[in-house]
Amino acid sequence: MLDLTLRALAWVLSICTPRPGGRHRLGALPPLRFIPTPPPRFTELLDGDASHLVRPYVLDPAELRRQRERRRAARLATLGIDVGPKRIHGVRVPATPR
C-alpha cells in the first residue's frame, strides 16, 4: 500500500512540477562536506546526593512584592499611566502634574 501511495505521489508531482531542462538542472547530488556522527551517549550515572534540593527561583516575599510592583508599573505604562519609582538614584522624584 505504501509503495502504491509513493508511486502515485511521485506521478502527481511529476505532472505538477516543471521538469528542469538545460544545463542548470541538477545532476548527481554533491558529496557531503562532513560525515554526520551520532551524538555521544551519556554513560555515567548521576549522583543524586551531589545535587542540592534547593530551588534557586524561589523568591522571598519582599522580592515577590517588588517584582509585582515592577510588573504592575510596566502594565500601567502601556496604558499611559506613570506609576514610576518614588526615588531614582537616591533622589526623591516629585510628582509631575499633567
Image: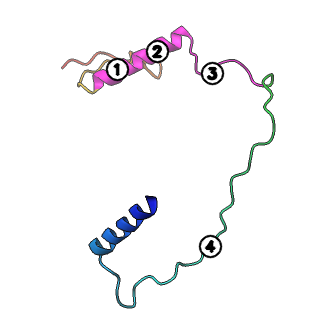
Please tell me which of labels 4 and 3 falls first in the chain.
Answer: 4
Query: Residues under labels 1 and 3: Cα distance?
Result: 25 Å
The residue pinned by badge 2 equals 66
Q: Nearer the viewer, residue 28 or 40?
A: 28
Query: Residues under labels 2 and 1: Cα distance?
Result: 11 Å
Q: What range of the chain is rendered magenta?
A: 51-77
The residue pinned by badge 4 equals 33
Residue 75 position, x and y percent, is 31, 23
| Type of secondary structure dominating the magenta stretch | helix
Check whether the beta carbons of the residues at disc 1 and disc 4 lie within 8 A of each other: no
Query: Does residue 19 appear left or right of residue 67 in this picture?
Result: left
Query: Does residue 8 appear left or right of residue 55 in this picture?
Result: left
Q: Nearer the viewer, mark 2 or mark 3?
A: 3
Image height check: is 46 above or below 64? Answer: below
**Numbered disc 3: secondary structure:** loop
Could you tell me which residue is drawn at 60 percent across and 73 percent down? 32
Could you tell me which residue is drawn at 47 percent across and 18 percent down? 90
Q: Amino acid at mark 1?
A: Ala
The residue pinned by badge 1 equals 73
Query: Does residue 62 appear left or right of residue 1 in this picture?
Result: right
Please tell me which of labels 4 and 2 falls first in the chain.
Answer: 4
Check whether the beta carbons of the residues at disc 2 and disc 3 lie within 8 A of each other: no
Please tell me which of labels 1 and 3 falls first in the chain.
Answer: 3
Check whether the beta carbons of the residues at disc 1 and disc 3 lie within 8 A of each other: no
Q: Nearer the viewer, residue 46 or 11?
A: 11
Residue 36 position, x and y percent, is 65, 63
Residue 44 position, x and y percent, is 81, 39
Residue 19's disc number = none
Check whether the beta carbons of the residues at disc 4 and disc 3 lie within 8 A of each other: no
The residue pinned by badge 3 equals 56
Q: Nearer the viewer, mark 1 or mark 3?
A: 3
Residue 63 position, x and y percent, is 52, 14
